[in-house]
Amino acid sequence: MTQNPDQVLIFDTTLRDGEQSPGCSMTQPEKLRVARALAELGVDVIEAGFPAASRGDFDAVSAIAREIAGPIVCGLARCNRDDIELVAKALQHAPRRRIHVFLATSAIHREHKLNMAKEEIVRIAVEGVKIARDLCADVEFSPEDASRTELEFLAQVVEAVIDAGATTVNIPDTVGYTVPDEFGELFRYLRQNVRGIERARLSVHCHDDLGMAVANSLTAVVAGARQIECTVNGIGERAGNCSLEEVVMALKTRETFFNLRTNVQSTRLYPTSRLVSNIVGMPIPRNKAIVGENAFAHESGIHQHGMLKHHSTYEIMRPESVGLSRSSLVLGKHSGRHAFRERVQQLGFELDELEFNRVFAEFKALADKKKELFDGDIEALVLRAEGAASGPWTLEDLQTIAGGGAPARAAVKLRHADGRLVERGVTGDGPVDAAVKAIETATGIDVALRKFELRSVSAGEDAQGEAIVYVEYNERTYRGSSVSTDIVESSARAFLEVVNRIELARKAGARTRDERTGGARIAQAAV
């Protein structure tokens, strides 16, 4: 296999492994938005999903394969013909495609999950790779829980799948168990003991259970891996995955140490991070490396003095290098289209004329309520306009009364896509509780509220508040979010977004049940 030894491929699995994080599920339009952002970011591979998991996953992978050009579009499959053929079908329209097959190899998984002997593991892995290779020239194999697999057996499996035609072999630390020195030795062992190892690209996929996903991934690169599997903001199951922005900027900032490069356009990191955060409803911690609010903030007097002398005293990266502008430009109701467009572009967003007109109208309406608009306000406007959840219900009017020791009361007026106008008024423990109960009564959807968060998206007394709600319905978690200067309104709209997601899921579920009757398959798994 021909590969550039100085190039590290960035394999993004935000849409597959990242979406498996509790509360981080995305609709198909949201997945397409993220996929477009990843293509603009310059990732080499987009793992779009696991087509056998559900009809929704299959449709999302198919849509991304049709619409996204540039990166390789990848789909995950277990080592069986049905899964692999589903991936091939979902990817059939992708200009560049890859089938990713996996099978657990550790003694723990062999005994407690698969109930298979080593010989059977090798046979099934080889068969899976051969089936995939008949359908696609680019095939990746992952020995799940590789970091807890006996070295000799792992080498045997890796050698066998390379002989079967795997072009990439990924070594996952599935449960975030390994440590850098140990993981580096694992890669060196494989390079020294697997015949034909040069015919495949070695990849690394780390989870962050012990907080070492990035360190382990970089150690693997030093030891010979030339693909890193990661997610935007490090989202993923349990404690998450290796963070894309962190490994990319580590390789770029310490280029003289690693002597390696990626194709990622680092100035797109900040807007892509904010987009994913907004879509999955997972706020970025202020102290998050690279893209957190405090990443380039300096409060200590000594640090500030040094920064005034020269930025390199306390900054190893420039904020502009990750797409974070430090413009002091503050917009208000007298700001024109040109200033607003320039600020939107500085923040890393590209809007067509129709989208820009819609966002500018929202900006003017908000500017009438706020004295000054900051970057957080503009980001919220753009992201809300891009990702406005479509659904059968829209909020036409909301009125709340609270105070005086009496129960709060809310009255809502909702319009359904079928033309119905529903009005309900109820009381609650507070205005937010009353508004949520009124929406439940009007729509007939009763849910269990599991989590409710409020946070400011900008500075000042008149800052916009973002409401994020998590509810449980039919043993599934749904998330909704909204932004407004009125926190009761943002809470009501966030809850209505959840209701719309449930309505759409119920319709999709009805279609899936019909398809199951016709022989469709549903599978669950993860690497």
Image (spheres, rainbow, N blue to C red):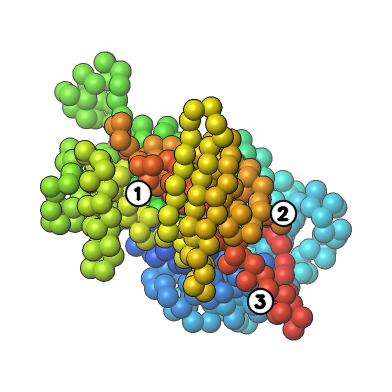
Query: Who comes first in sequence, dot 3 or dot 1?
Result: 1
Query: Who comes first in sequence, dot 3 or dot 2?
Result: 2
Seen in the picture, residue 474 relative to 289 is either above or below; the reply is: below
Q: Position of residue 59 (x, y in %)?
A: 56, 74
Q: Nearer the viewer, residue 320 or 449?
A: 449
In the drawing, what numbered circle is on residue 348? none
Label 3 to label 1: alpha-carbon separation: 34 Å
Q: Secondary structure at mark 3?
A: helix
Quarter placement of the C terminus: bottom right
Task: Name which residue lies at 67% across and 70% down.
Answer: 509
Q: Are marks 3 and 1 in contact (CB under 8 Å)?
A: no
Q: Position of residue 381 (x, y in %)?
A: 32, 52
Q: Position of residue 184 (x, y in %)?
A: 57, 43
Quickly name the residue at label 2.
Answer: 475
Q: Are marks 1 and 2 in contact (CB under 8 Å)?
A: no
Type of the residue with mark 2: Glu
Task: Name which residue lies at 13% across and 53% down.
Answer: 336
Label 1 to label 2: alpha-carbon separation: 30 Å
Q: Nearer the viewer, residue 273 or 314?
A: 273
In the drawing, what numbered circle is on residue 511? 3
Query: Who comes first in sequence, dot 1 or dot 2?
Result: 1
Q: Nearer the viewer, residue 265 or 517?
A: 517
Q: Position of residue 123 (x, y in %)?
A: 78, 69
Type of the residue with mark 1: Ala
Type of the residue with mark 3: Arg
Drawn side of residue 231 relative to residue 347, left or right: right
